[in-house]
Image: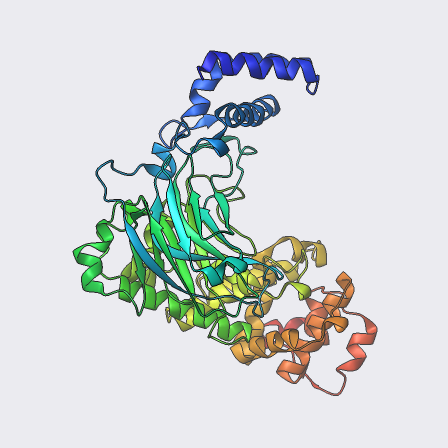
Amino acid sequence: MACRSYCILTCVLLLITGAFSLKAQSTASKLLTHVDSLHVPSPSKPVLNNTPELKRATKIGYREYNLLQDFDHHPEAKAVGYKIFPGDVPANATRVNQTVTIPVKVGTQPLNDPGSVYYRAHSTGLYVPAGEKVTITINDNDIKQYFRAQIGVHNDDVTHLDEFKRIPFDLTVTFRLDAKQVDVYSPYGGLLLINIADTTSLKTVTLNVKGAVKAPYFKLGETSEADWNLSIRNNPGPWAELATDNIVLTVPSYRIRKLDNPVKLMKFWDEVMNADADLAAMPQKRMHHERIIIDNDVAYGYMFTTLDKIVSPDDESCEWMLNEQFIRSHGSWGTFHELGHRHQYWPFEDGATQEVTVNLYTMYVYDKVLHKGIYQHEGMESRQEVIAKIMSYISSPDAGYNKWAQDPFLALAMYIQIIDAFGWNAIKTVNAAYRNTPKDQFPKTAQQKIDFRFITLCKATNSNLSRFFEVWRIPVSYVAKKQVEGHKEWFPPELGAYK
């Protein structure tokens, strides 16, 4: 439908419903000029969306566009802007008719996982072009499994951002595979994933896919590096996946066209995942992988983590993530940090610690995988800098728990003193205690969490840390302090003047 007709209908709907203020209605009427840029956002021409009126107009505009296009009933339809993101498939790319066998990796593990029944995404190595039907055929016995076919990985609505560089809505489409043959399609296109319930007992799933194109897909231990370099990395799908049993990196294909060493790269990421598992006091062998997804528009902050994914921007962080030599030499604090969030045990964290203990995982990777030690963040690049930071805080007239809780790197300095004195085993022991605590004994209030953290640290170090916590202004209760009186008192020598 022409832009003008679409805009007029949008404005009429706004006026009829009376849902918005006169100012919002005025903004909606301006869609006559705004809609062209709304339709084709790109990295070089992002769409400005920095007022409440623009945000409302964006939401209603795209909603009505989707309604008028009726994508659900028009498999041949293609959304405006799909060629920019997620990307186009060459018309002459071979459409395949092939059998795909998927190893099933499902189930919950001792992380902050979605509860059952959760459908976990499994890669196929295939891409569904926008506006084209793809036929999936499954075995008769698998119809009752109610698999779901998912097209695309970018499911974040980013209409709340002040600007956007891609179509700002959820770009994924799902279909129930509840018949022997199901046609799937998307106006955006995207990687084809098969979502499998984590309650299944299946070890593998075999299905046939007709009409998709091959995407660059590398699985450590399964894909030959020779085949990757010869042909796979040049597969026409605009999105690629690099996978192990521990992690999947979902990245734009242009980023991996010249990647020669996927084996070394993914072995590195397995090292990172195993290190995180060790510190988290959980098995290295995982029930399912974690997934990092690159997006043109990150919905929250620079990067963010949810229960089922990490989202990172298509910038130097993505470049570093795919360069084994560089990241092993220099690290990537942001990416390691987000993976740390996936390994924190949230029942024992609160607003004061969630951005603190996450960086224990970041530091552990720098120390044990990169062999660079624990002093790696700006302003904390040596023991002397950390001690100076601590002394500045302790001697400050406004030192207190509120300040500690509002400064993650100040709070991290406290943990660094523990690691410096007792080693990483103290942190591992604390994390093991967390994970071994029955749910009915989880701390519920902020004070209970402080006391639990204090008591477990004292037990892990076989030390009475009462004075140490007092100097740091952490409000441990009298009852908690009484529980550790049998341990020998410990206090860091660098703070001797405050003992």
Quadrant placement of the N terminus: top left
- Residue 433 location (% of width, % of height): 65, 77
Q: In the drawing, does residue 330 fall left or right of residue 456?
A: left
Identified at 45% across, 70% down, the residue is 203
State the scheme by which the image is colored.
rainbow
- Residue 17 location (% of width, % of height): 69, 18
Identified at 52% across, 70% down, the residue is 201
- Residue 59 location (% of width, % of height): 57, 27
**Foreground: 15 or 443?**
15
| Residue 379 seen in the current view | no
For residue 115, which quarter of the picture? bottom right
Residue 324 in the image: above or below residue 51 = below
- Residue 446 location (% of width, % of height): 75, 61
Identified at 60% across, 77% down, the residue is 432
Quadrant placement of the C terminus: bottom right
For residue 124, which quarter of the picture? bottom left
Residue 64 in the image: above or below residue 421 = above
Give the number of callouts: 0
For residue 350, which quarter of the picture? bottom right
Q: In the drawing, does residue 170 fall left or right of residue 295?
A: right
Residue 303 in the image: above or below residue 52 = below
**Foreground: 499 or 8?**
8
